[in-house]
Amino acid sequence: MAFTPLPLKAGPSFGSKGSAMGPRIQPPIPQGAPPPPKAPRGVRVEERIGIQAPAAVIWEVLADLPRWHEWNPTYPKAEGELRIHSVLNLTLALPGEEPEEIRPKVLDWVPNEQLLWELKALRGLVRTTRYIEIDPLAEASCVVDNGEIFGGLMGPSLGRKMGKVVQRGFRAMNEALKARAEAIWAERRGA
């Protein structure tokens, strides 16, 4: 499936499909200003899940990279700092595949909203843009989009070939994120 650029969510990202209130509307571009950055093109693989917890709690779980090994089956090892242009050290463990070490570069992050990173392979012939977006629906209810866009010369064919495996990995990560965030939220509400 080809990727159609979506409205920008924050900065140079490629963002949101909107919330329960409808799609986000971009302000007009001032006369003489450069156009906004274009969304990455390629094959998109995405998995969405509803989580009964506030965006801040979900973000707290996502932003705590050193503890990903406690809950995240898709990235059982994560090191680094959420800072634009920083490089993360991750172990990617997709279902049925051998785990591999990857070193993506953080492109953007917005607390309680999104995390975006890029990975290049085969001398740039494969470029992936990985995103996790949190869209609040209510005070303690969100939809999390967990996806990746496979671009570059060889990226779309890799995305089509690996799409189902990648999607299963995202589904497992989403379910684990849901369990972790909802447990934290339930504990805080009961306290």
Image (cartoon, rainbow, N blue to C red):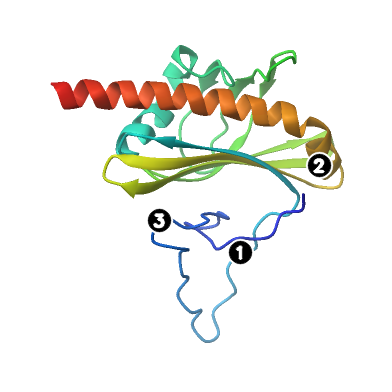
Q: Is residue 158 shown to the viewer in this render?
A: yes
Image position, residue 140 (x, y; %): 28, 39
Residue 133 versus residue 94 in the image, above or below: below
Amino acid at dot 1: Pro
Give the secondary structure at mark 3: loop
Residue 30 versus residue 103 in the image, above or below: below
User: What residue do we see at 49% from left, 82% from top?
Assistant: 30
For disc 2, the neighbor class at 10 Å (few under 14, some 14 to 19, many from 20) is many
Amino acid at dot 2: Gly
Label 2 and label 3: CA atoms lie apart by 32 Å
Nearer the viewer's eye, disc 2 or disc 3? Answer: 3
Q: Determine whether, in the image, residue 15 is placed left or right of residue 136.
A: right
Q: Determine whether, in the image, residue 122 is placed left or right of residue 72.
A: right
Residue 52 versus residue 66 in the image, above or below: below
Residue 95 versus residue 24 in the image, above or below: above
Label 3 and label 1: CA atoms lie apart by 25 Å
